[in-house]
């Protein structure tokens, strides 16, 4: 099992953290108000918030990638990818733990990405047809 198996969990973790960051940045912007120095202040808020999120996510993302990397990098540990049953179970437990702790919905993220890709492939002309195929509760 390689680190690509952890990608959906990593993407969901990053997406949730970025959504929280965006919300908090907008709150900070509202408090800044208007003025000559606001542009510079907003840049500082963006940089600081990105740095905080990156530092908070570094350890869990590194752990997921490390757990998913084949041990020893060889084929002698249980299959073509070098992953043993124990290492696969460890990766799954790690992904489930991160998903649970951070309240991630990885399947929903994957569905959203697939829908976005399908919409992009159809272009602007197919949007009405795509919207008609979606359940009313999911249309935006």
Image (tube, rainbow, N blue to C red):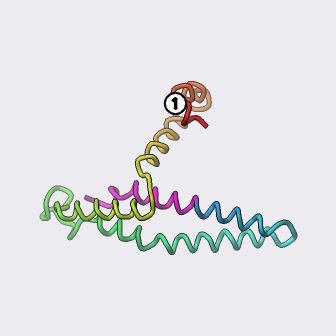
| Left or right: where 36 falls relative to 39 | right
Name the residue furthest right.
Answer: 36
Question: Quick one: 117 or 89, which is closer to the camera?
Answer: 89
Query: In the picture, which quadrant includes the N terminus?
Result: bottom left
- Give 98 or 78, whichever is nearer the viewer: 98
Q: Residue at x 41, y 70 (%)?
A: 60
Q: Which residues are magenta?
A: 1-19
Q: Secondary structure at mark 1?
A: loop
Where's residue 75, x and y in %? 15, 62
Residue 67 appears in which quarter of the rendering? bottom left
Q: Residue at x 52, y 30 (%)?
A: 134
98 relative to 120, above or below: below
Q: Which residue is mark 1?
A: 135
- Give the residue drawn at x 70%, y 73%: 44
Residue 43 belongs to the span the image colors magenta: no
Q: Main secondary structure of the magenta part?
A: helix
Asked whether, in this view, residue 134 is left or right of residue 88, the answer is right
Q: Residues within 10 Å of mark 1 (few under 14, many from 20)?
A: few
Q: Does the segment drawn in magenta span residue 16? A: yes
- Out of 12 and 82, give the one closest to the viewer: 12
Residue at image location 34% in from the left, 61% down from the top: 95
Quarter occupied by the C terminus: top right
């Amino acid at each position: 099992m390689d680190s690509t198996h952890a990608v959906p969990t990593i993407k969901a973790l990053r997406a949730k953290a970025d959504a929280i960051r965006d919300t908090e940045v907008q709150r900070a912007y509202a408090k800044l108000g208007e003025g000559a120095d606001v542009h510079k202040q907003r840049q500082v808020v963006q940089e600081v918030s990105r740095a905080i999120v990156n530092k908070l996510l570094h350890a869990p993302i590194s752990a997921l990638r490390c757990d998913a990397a084949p041990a020893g990098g060889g084929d002698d540990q249980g299959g073509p990818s070098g992953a043993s049953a124990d290492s696969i179970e460890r990766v799954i437990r790690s992904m489930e733990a991160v998903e649970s702790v951070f309240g991630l919905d990885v399947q929903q993220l994957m569905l959203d990405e697939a829908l976005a890709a399908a919409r992009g492939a159809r272009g602007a002309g197919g949007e009405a047809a795509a919207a008609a195929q979606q359940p009313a509760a999911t249309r935006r």
